[in-house]
Amino acid sequence: MDVIELRPVDRREVEEVLAALREFGEVPADVVLIFADRDSARELAGADVEGAKAVESGGHYAVVVVSPDKLSLWRELAAISALNDVDAVSIWARPEHAVGELAGILSAALYRRVVDLYIARRDVRLLAARFNPQDIPVEADDVRRSLVYTLALDATVSMAVAGFKSLAEELYLRARRIPIYNLYGRFRDFVIKNFKFEYIYNYLSLFSP
Protein backbone atom coordinates (compact mmCIF):
# COMPACT_ATOMS: atom_id res chain seq x y z
CA MET A 1 0.00 0.00 0.00
CA ASP A 2 1.31 3.44 -0.93
CA VAL A 3 1.70 5.84 1.99
CA ILE A 4 1.74 9.63 1.64
CA GLU A 5 2.67 11.85 4.58
CA LEU A 6 1.27 15.40 4.54
CA ARG A 7 2.15 15.92 8.19
CA PRO A 8 4.92 14.71 10.49
CA VAL A 9 4.25 11.08 11.41
CA ASP A 10 6.27 8.88 13.72
CA ARG A 11 6.86 5.26 12.79
CA ARG A 12 4.75 3.98 15.68
CA GLU A 13 1.66 5.71 14.30
CA VAL A 14 2.35 4.39 10.81
CA GLU A 15 2.74 0.85 12.13
CA GLU A 16 -0.42 1.18 14.24
CA VAL A 17 -2.45 2.22 11.21
CA LEU A 18 -0.92 -0.40 8.93
CA ALA A 19 -1.58 -3.09 11.55
CA ALA A 20 -5.25 -2.04 11.71
CA LEU A 21 -5.48 -2.21 7.92
CA ARG A 22 -3.88 -5.65 7.83
CA GLU A 23 -6.23 -6.86 10.55
CA PHE A 24 -9.24 -5.67 8.56
CA GLY A 25 -8.07 -7.66 5.54
CA GLU A 26 -8.36 -7.22 1.81
CA VAL A 27 -10.47 -4.48 0.30
CA PRO A 28 -11.86 -4.91 -3.26
CA ALA A 29 -10.16 -1.72 -4.48
CA ASP A 30 -6.72 -0.13 -4.56
CA VAL A 31 -6.24 2.20 -1.61
CA VAL A 32 -3.64 4.87 -0.89
CA LEU A 33 -3.02 5.86 2.73
CA ILE A 34 -2.61 9.60 3.40
CA PHE A 35 -1.58 11.01 6.78
CA ALA A 36 -2.86 14.57 6.98
CA ASP A 37 -3.50 17.32 9.49
CA ARG A 38 -7.04 18.62 9.94
CA ASP A 39 -6.68 21.41 7.39
CA SER A 40 -5.24 19.14 4.70
CA ALA A 41 -7.83 16.47 5.47
CA ARG A 42 -10.66 18.98 5.15
CA GLU A 43 -9.31 20.06 1.79
CA LEU A 44 -9.03 16.47 0.56
CA ALA A 45 -12.33 15.19 1.97
CA GLY A 46 -14.42 18.33 1.61
CA ALA A 47 -15.46 18.10 5.26
CA ASP A 48 -13.98 17.95 8.74
CA VAL A 49 -12.26 14.64 9.51
CA GLU A 50 -11.90 13.40 13.08
CA GLY A 51 -10.30 9.98 12.67
CA ALA A 52 -10.15 8.73 9.10
CA LYS A 53 -12.10 9.34 5.90
CA ALA A 54 -12.18 7.52 2.57
CA VAL A 55 -12.03 9.73 -0.51
CA GLU A 56 -12.85 8.47 -4.00
CA SER A 57 -11.75 9.96 -7.29
CA GLY A 58 -12.17 8.28 -10.64
CA GLY A 59 -12.58 4.85 -9.11
CA HIS A 60 -9.47 5.21 -6.97
CA TYR A 61 -9.55 5.50 -3.19
CA ALA A 62 -7.48 7.20 -0.52
CA VAL A 63 -7.95 6.83 3.21
CA VAL A 64 -7.08 10.13 4.85
CA VAL A 65 -5.89 9.67 8.44
CA VAL A 66 -5.96 12.50 10.96
CA SER A 67 -5.71 10.25 14.02
CA PRO A 68 -5.19 6.46 14.21
CA ASP A 69 -8.63 5.45 15.47
CA LYS A 70 -9.20 1.78 14.65
CA LEU A 71 -12.99 1.89 14.36
CA SER A 72 -12.84 4.98 12.16
CA LEU A 73 -10.26 3.29 9.91
CA TRP A 74 -12.29 0.12 9.69
CA ARG A 75 -15.50 2.00 8.92
CA GLU A 76 -13.83 3.67 5.94
CA LEU A 77 -12.39 0.39 4.67
CA ALA A 78 -15.79 -1.21 5.15
CA ALA A 79 -17.42 1.67 3.27
CA ILE A 80 -15.09 1.07 0.32
CA SER A 81 -15.84 -2.65 0.46
CA ALA A 82 -19.60 -2.08 0.63
CA LEU A 83 -19.42 0.01 -2.54
CA ASN A 84 -17.27 -2.43 -4.51
CA ASP A 85 -18.29 -5.92 -3.41
CA VAL A 86 -21.11 -7.31 -5.55
CA ASP A 87 -22.66 -9.32 -2.72
CA ALA A 88 -22.67 -6.29 -0.43
CA VAL A 89 -24.16 -4.02 -3.08
CA SER A 90 -26.97 -6.53 -3.65
CA ILE A 91 -28.07 -5.97 -0.04
CA TRP A 92 -28.30 -2.19 0.11
CA ALA A 93 -28.67 -0.95 -3.48
CA ARG A 94 -32.18 -0.11 -4.57
CA PRO A 95 -33.49 -1.62 -7.82
CA GLU A 96 -34.61 0.67 -10.63
CA HIS A 97 -38.30 0.26 -9.84
CA ALA A 98 -37.84 1.50 -6.25
CA VAL A 99 -38.06 5.27 -6.47
CA GLY A 100 -38.84 8.08 -4.07
CA GLU A 101 -37.67 9.23 -0.67
CA LEU A 102 -38.41 6.00 1.20
CA ALA A 103 -36.29 3.94 -1.19
CA GLY A 104 -33.45 6.43 -0.86
CA ILE A 105 -33.35 6.53 2.92
CA LEU A 106 -33.74 2.74 3.19
CA SER A 107 -30.83 2.21 0.81
CA ALA A 108 -28.69 4.59 2.87
CA ALA A 109 -29.69 2.87 6.12
CA LEU A 110 -28.88 -0.58 4.77
CA TYR A 111 -25.56 0.69 3.46
CA ARG A 112 -24.69 1.71 7.03
CA ARG A 113 -25.77 -1.69 8.32
CA VAL A 114 -23.58 -3.42 5.72
CA VAL A 115 -20.61 -1.24 6.70
CA ASP A 116 -21.06 -2.25 10.34
CA LEU A 117 -21.55 -5.87 9.28
CA TYR A 118 -17.99 -5.91 7.92
CA ILE A 119 -16.76 -4.64 11.29
CA ALA A 120 -18.89 -7.01 13.37
CA ARG A 121 -17.50 -10.00 11.49
CA ARG A 122 -13.97 -8.92 12.39
CA ASP A 123 -14.33 -7.55 15.93
CA VAL A 124 -17.86 -7.30 17.26
CA ARG A 125 -16.66 -5.93 20.60
CA LEU A 126 -15.11 -2.94 18.87
CA LEU A 127 -18.47 -2.14 17.29
CA ALA A 128 -20.42 -2.81 20.49
CA ALA A 129 -18.18 -0.54 22.55
CA ARG A 130 -19.15 2.52 20.48
CA PHE A 131 -22.87 1.73 20.22
CA ASN A 132 -25.21 3.77 22.42
CA PRO A 133 -28.58 1.98 22.87
CA GLN A 134 -30.14 5.25 24.01
CA ASP A 135 -29.82 6.59 20.46
CA ILE A 136 -32.66 4.29 19.38
CA PRO A 137 -35.52 4.12 18.56
CA VAL A 138 -35.95 7.34 16.59
CA GLU A 139 -39.36 8.99 16.28
CA ALA A 140 -39.89 10.87 13.03
CA ASP A 141 -42.96 12.42 11.43
CA ASP A 142 -44.31 9.10 10.16
CA VAL A 143 -43.93 5.42 10.98
CA ARG A 144 -41.86 4.40 7.97
CA ARG A 145 -39.30 7.14 8.47
CA SER A 146 -39.12 6.28 12.16
CA LEU A 147 -38.35 2.65 11.36
CA VAL A 148 -35.74 3.42 8.71
CA TYR A 149 -34.00 6.21 10.64
CA THR A 150 -33.76 3.85 13.62
CA LEU A 151 -32.37 1.07 11.44
CA ALA A 152 -29.66 3.45 10.22
CA LEU A 153 -28.45 3.88 13.82
CA ASP A 154 -29.04 0.35 15.10
CA ALA A 155 -25.69 -1.43 14.98
CA THR A 156 -27.24 -4.40 16.81
CA VAL A 157 -28.83 -5.42 13.50
CA SER A 158 -25.38 -5.81 11.96
CA MET A 159 -24.18 -7.73 15.01
CA ALA A 160 -27.11 -10.13 14.79
CA VAL A 161 -26.69 -10.68 11.05
CA ALA A 162 -22.99 -11.38 11.70
CA GLY A 163 -24.03 -14.17 14.08
CA PHE A 164 -23.65 -12.42 17.45
CA LYS A 165 -27.33 -12.58 18.37
CA SER A 166 -26.95 -12.82 22.14
CA LEU A 167 -24.79 -9.70 22.33
CA ALA A 168 -27.06 -7.90 19.88
CA GLU A 169 -30.16 -8.65 21.95
CA GLU A 170 -28.42 -7.71 25.19
CA LEU A 171 -27.59 -4.29 23.78
CA TYR A 172 -30.94 -3.80 22.06
CA LEU A 173 -32.87 -4.43 25.26
CA ARG A 174 -31.22 -1.30 26.67
CA ALA A 175 -32.91 0.87 24.02
CA ARG A 176 -35.35 3.58 25.07
CA ARG A 177 -38.90 2.31 25.66
CA ILE A 178 -40.72 4.97 23.69
CA PRO A 179 -43.99 4.43 21.76
CA ILE A 180 -42.30 3.23 18.55
CA TYR A 181 -40.24 0.59 20.44
CA ASN A 182 -42.50 -2.44 19.96
CA LEU A 183 -43.24 -1.63 16.34
CA TYR A 184 -39.55 -1.17 15.61
CA GLY A 185 -38.76 -4.43 17.42
CA ARG A 186 -40.96 -6.36 14.98
CA PHE A 187 -39.44 -4.53 12.03
CA ARG A 188 -35.93 -5.20 13.35
CA ASP A 189 -36.62 -8.94 13.65
CA PHE A 190 -37.81 -8.98 10.04
CA VAL A 191 -34.72 -7.11 8.83
CA ILE A 192 -32.36 -9.51 10.59
CA LYS A 193 -34.08 -12.50 9.00
CA ASN A 194 -34.51 -10.87 5.57
CA PHE A 195 -31.42 -8.71 5.17
CA LYS A 196 -31.98 -7.35 1.69
CA PHE A 197 -33.43 -4.15 0.26
CA GLU A 198 -36.31 -5.64 -1.72
CA TYR A 199 -37.75 -7.66 1.16
CA ILE A 200 -37.51 -4.77 3.61
CA TYR A 201 -38.91 -2.25 1.12
CA ASN A 202 -41.92 -4.50 0.54
CA TYR A 203 -42.41 -4.82 4.30
CA LEU A 204 -42.43 -1.05 4.69
CA SER A 205 -44.97 -0.70 1.89
CA LEU A 206 -47.52 -2.29 4.23
CA PHE A 207 -47.53 0.91 6.28
CA SER A 208 -49.46 3.96 5.14
CA PRO A 209 -47.22 6.92 4.24
Image (cartoon, rainbow, N blue to C red):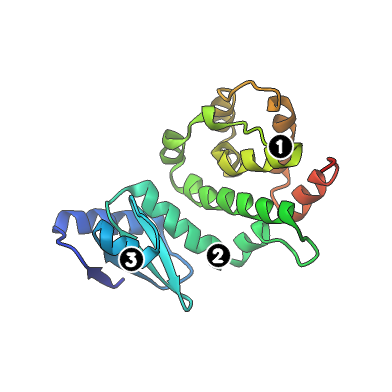
Label whose residue precedes the other's in the sequence (1 or 3):
3
Residue on which the image places disc 3: 43
**Gap between marks 2 and 3 measured at Cα:** 23 Å
Which residue is pictured at 50% across the width and 62% down the height? 81
Distance from disc 1 to disc 3, alpha carbons, whole Å, reads 36 Å
Depth check, front residue: 165 or 202: 202
Total count of labels: 3
- Reading the chain from its start, which is encountered first: label 1 or label 2? 2
Name which residue lies at 18% across and 63% down: 7
Which residue ends up furthest to the top in the rendered image?
A: 177
Residue 83: assigned label: 2
Quadrant in the picture for residue 208: top right
| Label 1 residue SS | loop
Q: Position of residue 16 (x, y in %)?
A: 24, 53
Please name the residue shown 31% across and 48% down the image.
69
Asked if 134 appears above or below 199 in the picture, the reply is above
Q: Residue at x 60, y 60 (%)?
A: 88
Residue 184: x %, y % from top left: 70, 32
Nearer-N-terminus badge (2/3): 3
